[in-house]
Amino acid sequence: MLKKRHYLYLDEIEYRVLIRSLVQMKNRLIHEGRFTDCVDELIMKVLSAPLKRI
């Protein structure tokens, strides 16, 4: 079964805001004593995504 792909086109500022927001969410989950696996996975996907200059 093929997974549907989603594409995000972000400029430099939006990219920074996205990463900062994910890290803040991870910190909040750690503070609450909850699992952070899904947020870790998403951070890694965003950081390893190929960059395309438009």
Image (spheres, rainbow, N blue to C red):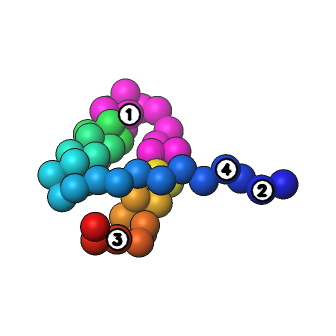
Badge 3 amino acid: Leu
Q: Which residue is mark 2?
A: 2
Q: Position of residue 49 (x, y in %)?
A: 43, 67
From the viewer's perspective, is residue 45 above or below residue 8?
A: below
**Marks 2 and 1, the one that precedes in the sequence:** 2
Q: Which residue is mark 4?
A: 4
**Marks 1 and 3, the one that precedes in the sequence:** 1
Badge 2 amino acid: Leu
**Quadrant occupied by the C terminus:** bottom left
For the point 46% across and 33% down, which residue is it?
34
**Which numbered circle lies on residue 51?**
3
Using a 10 Å C-alpha cutoff, classify the residue at mark 4 as few (fewer than 14 neighbours), some (14 to 19) or many (20 or more): few
Q: Residue furthest top?
A: 32
**Quadrant occupied by the N terminus:** bottom right
Are the two marked residues, 2 and 4, in contact with CB atoms closer than 8 angstroms? yes
Between disc 2 and disc 1, the foreground one is 2
Are the two marked residues, 3 and 2, in contact with CB atoms closer than 8 angstroms? no
Q: Which residue is mark 1?
A: 29
